[in-house]
Amino acid sequence: MPSSPKAYYPRPSRYSYVRRSSFLAFCLLIGITSFAFGLVSILKPAPGYKCKNSVARSVSVVWEKGKHVEDLNRVSSVGNQKRYKVMGFVGIQTGFGSVGRRRSLRKTWMPSDKQGLQRLEESTGLAFRFVIGRTNDNSKMSELRKEVAEYDDFMLLDIEEEYSKLPYKTLAFFKAAYALIDSDFYVKADDDIYLRPDRLSLLLAKERSHPQTYLGCMKKGPVFTEPTLKWYEPLSYLLGKEYFLHAYGPIYALSADVVASLVALRNDR
């Protein structure tokens, strides 16, 4: 009777066994490492813009408003018309070279149509406008007029749009915004940030009971002079003087009382 064939299974060598074990151990190590990194990423707070001086401070502001009451009343009334009322008016500071940034904002958190802006305002109490000045470049002004006609989401300031004149533009924005909009807060924002309108709305609503409020970062920065904006850091260092504490950052808010006082002052500095 013929014998049945037997299957032959080669016995793995010690070398192949060690190599396979090492590979499995390596794969296991990668898996554990990936899991650890994923867990840390989930538990770690999301990165974002943080103030260098993150400790909350209380600042008492005293304004001499008595002699400016007449000016304040004149500026706050525009053609005897009642100002439009919102909880917060957000002016997004932009420039002629920021067409791409505005396009990105309109594709993300800021609606690109009038109805969308209206719905956002109704849900958050916030109104949004891009803030821009003027230029002598006719082609740039022509392109801006087309964009204004298409989106109707601009506040146009009668001030030259230059980097060296940003402080004047900021002050012009607060004055124009106060004259046009009756708001509890006036917010200055840059056009290169991703904003959460819902969170901003909650923050402003929480602070509405405080009449003289600044919400934002503070820092001690370099001292500049006009009109060449020379930096006098070495001189200040030699004299042993500290920089003045001032507002800064990609977004900050002023309450209506503070903006009213700025509007009433008899200077543009």
Image: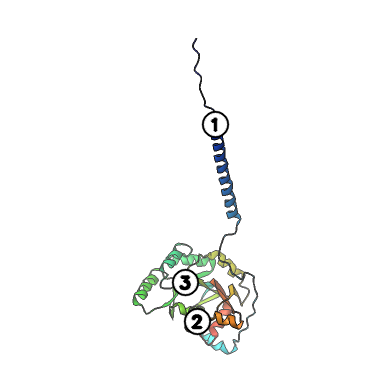
Q: On screen, 9 above or below 159? A: above
Callout 1 secondary element:
loop
Q: Rounded to the nearest whole Å, what is the CA distance between mark 1 and mark 3?
A: 74 Å
| Residue 103 figure quarter | bottom left
Q: Which residue is mark 3?
A: 129
In the rendering, which numbered label is found on residue 230?
2
Q: Residue at x 40, y 72 (%)?
A: 148
Category of crowding for the residue at label 2, using alpha-carbon neighbours closer than 10 angstroms: few (below 14), some (14–19), many (at least 20): few
Q: Nearer the viewer, mark 1 or mark 3?
A: 1
Q: Nearer the viewer, residue 110 or 188?
A: 188
Mark sitting earlier along the chain (3/2): 3
Rendered image coloring scheme: rainbow
Mark sitting earlier along the chain (1/3): 1
Please state the horizontal and vertical placement of residue 167, each as a whole percent of the image: 50, 79
Q: Residue at x 58, y 45 (%)?
A: 29
- Residue 202 visible at all: yes
Q: Residue at x 58, y 52 (%)?
A: 37
Q: Rounded to the nearest whole Å, what is the CA distance between mark 3 and mark 2?
A: 32 Å
Q: Which residue is mark 1?
A: 13
Q: Rounded to the nearest whole Å, what is the CA distance between mark 1 and mark 2?
A: 77 Å
Residue type at tag 2: Lys
Residue type at tag 1: Ser
Q: On screen, 108 above or below 168? A: above
Q: Nearer the viewer, residue 168 or 123?
A: 168
Q: Nearer the viewer, mark 3 or mark 2?
A: 2
Category of crowding for the residue at label 3, using alpha-carbon neighbours closer than 10 angstroms: few (below 14), some (14–19), many (at least 20): some
Residue type at tag 3: Arg
